[in-house]
Amino acid sequence: MTNLNDTVSDSALMGDFTWGNVSINLDNIPQNVFVGLAKQGIIHKLGNEVAAGLVKVKEKFEKEGGTWDEDVKEEKSIELRQQMVQKILEGTIGLRIGGPRGTTIENIAFELAMKEAEAKLAPKGYWPKADRKNGIKAEDAQIEFGGRQMTRDDLAEMVFDKYHDRFMKAAEDEHKARVEKAKLAKANQVKPVASVDKSAEDVLADLI
């Protein structure tokens, strides 16, 4: 029987994972916590990502002359979830983690890559959009690109990897500019004017 306090290292060796400026050794995570985190990830895949993918399925289905209703929606949702489960079990699902990349320079570089990716792809219709009606956030939205469903992070990652050195150099310049801008803003801060206490006579004079 599995002890919920056992760590993942009892059955696997995965090492450190760094996100932002902190690292955590995955092997030291208690197994019950690891299972809980895994379930959250699976819920996201089967929920948000399937919902995002369903938007494209609906568009294609209606374009081909089909009538989209709740029964068809449920049928297609089940199909997408089964496909997602299969990808998870086969190990073929994308696992790139978005968010902070470790250093300030890397974060700025990825930010610049994201902006360039949107500038290049959005005009051509290859930029995932939020769908508030269906509860899909911008970061969860997907679009078919290169034969697979991709998020904004996935597309930005492709651009970032392709022009890595250029983005890192641009990020260094951008970081310097931001630091200087912050210093200038701090130096130019207007100090609040001290309030002046008025006598009763002054206050009365203001009123009349």
Image (tube, rainbow, N blue to C red):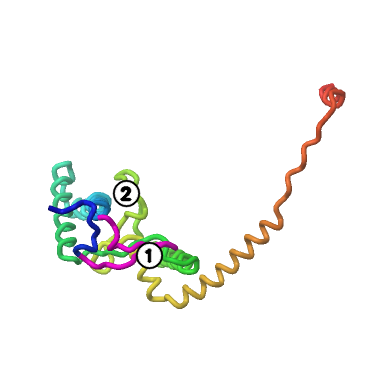
Q: Total marks drawn?
A: 2
Q: Within 10 angstroms of label 2, few (less than 14), some, or many (20 or more) residues?
A: some
Residue receiving disc 2 = 136
Q: Helix, strand, or loop for circle 1?
A: strand
Q: Helix, strand, or loop for circle 2?
A: loop
Find the magenta span and give its range: 12-30
State the image coordinates of residue 148 (x, y, percent, origin top left): 24, 65
Residue 37 colored in magenta in the image: no
Residue receiving disc 1 = 18
Task: Report whether 104 appears left or right of 95.
Answer: right
Q: Residue at x 21, y 62 (%)?
A: 10
* Quadrant assignment, res 88: bottom left
Quarter placement of the C terminus: top right
* Residue 52 appearing in the image: no
Residue type highlighted by circle 2: Ile
Q: What's the CA distance linking mark 2 and mark 1?
A: 28 Å
* Residue 172 appearing in the image: yes
**Between disc 2 and disc 1, whose residue precedes?**
1
Give whichever of 125, 185 is nearer the camera: 185
Residue type highlighted by circle 1: Thr
Residue 14 colored in magenta in the image: yes
Task: Report whether 197 appears left or right of 45.
Answer: right
Q: Residue at x 59, y 69 (%)?
A: 176
